[in-house]
Amino acid sequence: MSSAAHILIVEDEFAVGMELEDHLTALGYTVVDHVMTGVDAIDTATQENLDLILMDVRLDGPMDGIEAAREIREDHSVPVVFVTAYSDDETLQRATETTPFGYVVKPFEEREVYAAVEVALHTHALQQRVQRANEDLRQLLNGLRQGTALTDADGRLTFLSDPAARLLDTTPDDATDSSWTAVLPVNDDTIEGIQNRMDAPGADEDPVPATLDHDDGTSYQVEIEVRADPRDDDRYILVFYDVTEVHELRRLLDDQDRFHDLVGTSAPMKDAFEQIRSVADVKTTVLIQGETGTGKELAARAIHEESPRSDGPFVAVNCAALNPDLAGSQLFGHRKGAFTGATEGQAGYFEAADGGTLFLDEIGDVPLDVQRQLLRVLEEEAVTRLGETEPRPVDVRIVAATHRNLDDEVEADRFRQDLLYRIRIARVPLPPLRERRSDLPLLVRTFLREIRARTGAEVVQVSDEALRHLLDYDWPGNVRELRNALEAALIRTSGDVLRVDDLPPEIREASPTETDSSTEEAERIRAALEQTNGNRTEAAELLGISRATLYRRLDEYGIG
């Protein structure tokens, strides 16, 4: 028996009230007061520390017991047990709306009063414990970094933690009872991804990536995990992981892996960066060698930016696009009337680059007669415009590039040997992408970020299966082909993740290359480890090999 309980009696029939007081006192309870109106009941509940109120339903005055109980319950958690001789449906309905803790029907016996009071006190104590547990759980969830939301069977939110509310740019009160699809500020593809996981729990346990854009311009990168509520399969738990900082740190790390506009951490690219640094400070001519699309112009610009000439002009010339009949004029300039159509004098590319760097891309395509003039300009550091006789001094640093084998071109009499010796005093080889596959995940992230900024696309990552196809492809067009392939894929992509079906057909349908080069295979393994943040099990799955095979390859290639 809860003998220490403090009870207030609210009864407008004095005799009935005294009878109740006698019963309660005999049972060992403490009767705080006996009042006869609803207003007095409210005042006493405000002033006293009550454990229970016995409230008559019918009271004299402007406020009956039900109205008094409603006002008291709005401000105090004290349980109310109604005393009534009336049990019509309307009265019961009104009483029920106040969430009573029991009823005592007149006339009553002492054991009935005792049973009603004890049940009410114990029920209230249990509710208090549950409420405290709920508050503790809420505080715990609000203290976590990740946000949490609960839905009912109809898809309406029954709970939203404070961290989740901040990510979703709402409040728990505004979101509660709303459909989760209306509360989440995400696109239709993200909604579909979450719904698919609800419809087929366990089929895809990967979190759904999403970008949450707020009205004030802020944006969050999150991953949304969907779990079935263990209490009810029709209810779900949504967990929001804020990975914005991770994305930003990854971006900063990626930026550290850039050398000017060149991107890479592979050994061949580090060697290229070191070569660029070593040749940048001297004026000697440099030959950049590499297949089409490897970034030869970017390397030339990096040499210029690293050199003492960085404040001067950088002039890039595609020699393959020069008019064979006018190549000399375009490179060295001409005077007025030097040839038909020369209506005025014009400086050539050499004079335009005076004080800076002239990049001659695809120098192997320069006509032979122009090669002779080019050699003379390099030796004399002066140009003679077409139609003139007086040379003009020029201070130009020459950086040349080609995808051709110039030794073969010399052998075929298409390129002057003396010019070859002159332009390749210093050399910077750029590796093809297939020999630096470990850079591919970094390049993919870099290009996706640039394409998103330029086009507003929402893709934030590439699926493992799509990345496997990118790793297996041979990339004849190298980095340029990769950039173009990603841009084409983003046109097809719907949602936040680029998948295999979004890739161009030549990549999607290509069979994995049979790699004879141990260097290329080692690069693929490094790429997989980079993509999986060093997780060897995931890297083996990405590569489509067993863990045992991966470990053997790691030992064989000395990959830590």
Image (tube, rainbow, N blue to C red):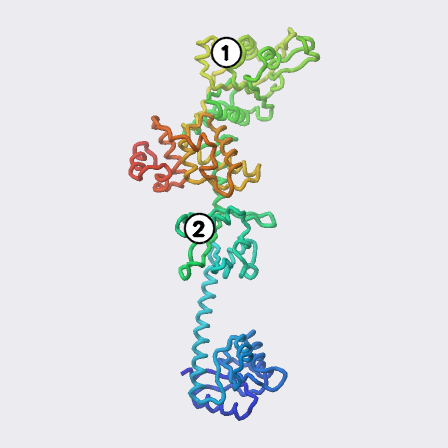
User: Which residue is found at the position 60% from the left and 26% from the top?
Assistant: 311
Nearer-the-camera pick, 544 or 429: 544
Q: In the current view of this chain or complex, which residue is farthest to the front?
A: 89
The answer to which quarter of the image holds residue 436 is top left
Q: Which amino acid does label 1 sit on?
A: Leu
- Which x, y percent locates residue 483? 50, 31
Which residue in the structure is indicated by mark 1?
419
Q: Does residue 537 lie above or below 520 as drawn?
A: below
Neighbour tally class for label 2: few under 14, some 14-19, many 20 plus, Cα within 10 Å: many
The answer to which quarter of the image holds residue 93 is bottom right
Q: Does residue 205 lie above or below 512 as drawn?
A: below
Nearer-the-camera pick, 370 or 467: 467
Is the N terminus in the top left, top right, bottom left or bottom right quadrant?
A: bottom left
- Which x, y percent locates residue 206? 42, 47
Which label number is shown at residue 456?
none
Q: Which amino acid does label 2 sit on?
A: Arg
Which residue in the structure is indicated by mark 2?
197
Asked if residue 369 can be seen in this view, the reply is yes
Mark in the foreground, 2 or 1: 2
Q: Does residue 345 lie above or below 490 as drawn?
A: above
**Mark before the other along the chain sequence, 2 or 1:** 2
Nearer-the-camera pick, 187 or 21: 187
* Distance between mark 2 and mark 1 Cα atoms: 65 Å
Classify mark 2: helix, strand or loop. helix
> Is 347 situated left or right of 255 in this image?
right
